[in-house]
Image (cartoon, rainbow, N blue to C red):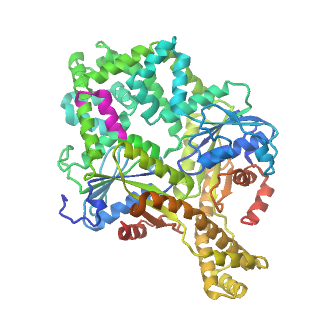
Amino acid sequence: MNVPELLAGKRVCVCAGSGGVGKTTTSAVIALGMAAQGLKVAVITIDPAKRLAAALGLEQLSNDLAQVPAERFAAAGLEVKGELWASMLDPKRTFDELIDAAAPTPERAGAIKENLVYQQISGAVAGSQEFTAVSKLYELFGDDRFDLIVLDTPPSRHALDFLEAPRRLNAFLEGRALQAFLKPTGVGLRMVGLGVAPLVGALKRITGVDLISDLTHFFGLLGPMTDTFSARARAVEVLLRSEATAFLLVTSAQDGPIAEASWFRDALEREGMAFCGAVVNRFHHDLSGGADRASVEAALAAALADPELAARVAENFADYGVLAARDEANLARLEADLRSQPVLPVPQFDSDIHDVVGLLRVHRFLFGSDSEREALIAGLLS
Amino acid sequence: MVSGAVSPLPLLEHRLIFVTGKGGVGRTTVARALGLIAARAGQRVIIAELTPASQAPDSRAGGIAEVKLAPGLFTITIDPQAAMEEYLRVKAGALGSALAASRIFGALAMATPGMRELLAIGKVWELAQVQRIRERAAPYDVVIVDAPATGHGVAALRTPRTFAEIARVGPIARQASTIAATIADPEFTAVVGVAQPEELPVSETLSLARALEKDHLRLAYVITNMCYPERFSEAEIARLESARQDAGTLTDAPLRAAISEGRRAAAQRPYLERLRAAFGERLVTLPYLFSAEPDIRSLADRLGTQL
């Protein structure tokens, strides 16, 4: 099993996973590999390392898609038959563009962008990255220039945050609960079963009058635009649940991320979304071939003619073996949990992956056939 | 110190310590090691997780219970919803409880951007008070916050000030300003960055320091986790490489592993230099642990001697 088989017939690939597991790099490699096979692919990256961005030709931080020149990969030995386009998410700009598109007049858009509540939502507040990432995905999905869109998801502790955060923000933008509350005769207050006046009083006592009036003003400006946001949110949810979308979990082989991988699969299935497999990065393969430490050390001492250096090499190998045993056990656990969905391990490399050569190294593991991958693992560090 | 214990480290003289850093660098492990150091010295300490470390169902019990792990060592996972209910109950009595019980109000409050962060930070602030607001609650010497990943972590630290600005006047503004002032007080609050000697964690730590500086905050320490040991000199790596030319089945894999470890150790050096240039003596390093699970005790021992 490899990535092209996983993504057969899909138009969207969402790479989810907790922070620090290599989501951005994995997304870039998937987009590159699918473009190499002849597809027109767009990848939305989020906070890529500078050198990774440079490898994709994104020196200028840009929210707009730019085509990555195929020559840079050809020179390294990978022919890109299709097209690779890449962008770097700018939440503030994406949000502003959303307002520009939805506002009835430029003046109204300007007034909203000036509003304090809006500035907080669009820039400072956690959740704006997730909201704009999903929004950007939806926009690109409607752009028929692309066969496949690959979405990197914002760094978060939990793989599911990228779904939950936009929902919260949408619930706020739709504003129904709030509007019901702010009207003195609102159903919200009546449902509490108490007199309206003391509750409004309590609300104002707790939140402050100005906050209430700022919020009221903000929703006044949005007006019918809230319907546009609702419609969009529903369309995004439909897209994420459609046959066209594949969710790929990116994880490392450590205990925590592995435990969360199984949980994530279950959570997605409950949501009716298609979990299609996991990429396990920084995997330590067992290279010992079952040899015990004493015989390894003796052989090294003979080969190096330096018992002290041989002891250190053997110790290093034993340490590596501890990580390999952990990773192999975690991989087996994940495979047993996922059963029908494939798990693709990518080894721990000697250095960070941040250039074209590095991307191609990962590419061989994600796009090679099973037998090609086995051969690679056998000759791993050579 | 409310417990009368003497702080074992200058860092642990702060009542409130935020531990932040890029995802995957071991923030939670470092927060727990710090908690262990404090508890070993007899301090009453609580580790507060702003986002639960795992979403596995059993750890999602929710609530805001302070759970005792060992004598003097407590932990709490802050659920914003529960924090809101407690706040309303304390602040607005029966009316507050009525509001808290209203599902619509709850949905509204949880949907208000930044409100979850404000409530969570507010609870952290409450934990760090000598006079606890929560009924019949004992005070702590130290509150260690396992804060969200860097970007969100800075946002969380900033939330109280943001709210103070938006709300301007009124109780939320007052409460938020009080919390913001506490965070800005270098005697009371310390922020610790956790890094790893790789490109992204290092550049995120440097931009974290800049972002904090704008808010007049300074990183007390940068704890760089998972540093590979320098096991082999360059000359030795060269010898290992030449020995690989005619390596046998028993020696090839160990030699490759050693060469690879040498390359990783070499790759991390420039990153450690960048951190040292930026943070000088505030840089602390922790070794890569070759174990199946992080050994908090041994990390606490190593941290204790360096801070």
| Quadrant housing the C terminus of chain B | bottom left
Along the horizontal axis of the image, is B252 left or right of A335? right
Residue B164 covered by magenta stretch: yes
Q: Can residue A229 be seen here?
A: yes
Along the horizontal axis of the image, is B12 left or right of B111? left
Q: Can residue B82 be seen here?
A: no
Along the horizontal axis of the image, is B254 left or right of B133? right
Q: Position of residue A82 (x, y in %)?
A: 80, 37
| Quadrant housing the N terminus of chain B | bottom left
The magenta region covers B158-171
Residue A36 in the image: above or below residue A238: below
Q: Quadrant of the rendered structure where residue B162 is? A: top left
Residue drawn at (29%, 60%) of the image: B12
Q: Position of residue A319 (x, y in %)?
A: 58, 72
Residue lying at the far front in this picture: please name it.
B277
Along the horizontal axis of the image, is A78 left or right of B133? right
Residue A117 covered by magenta stretch: no
Residue A289 in the image: above or below residue A152: below
Residue A105 in the image: above or below residue B148: above
Q: Tally the marks.
A: 0
Q: Quadrant of the rendered structure where residue B116 is? A: top left
Q: Position of residue A153 (x, y in %)?
A: 57, 40
Residue drawn at (54%, 17%) of the image: A102
Residue drawn at (52%, 44%) of the image: A155
- A208 and A172: which one is in front? A208
Q: Which SS type dominates the magenta stretch? A: helix
- A148 and B82: which one is in front? A148
- B293 and A353: which one is in front? A353
Q: Position of residue A206 (x, y in %)?
A: 24, 28
Q: Quadrant of the rendered structure where residue A6 is? A: top right
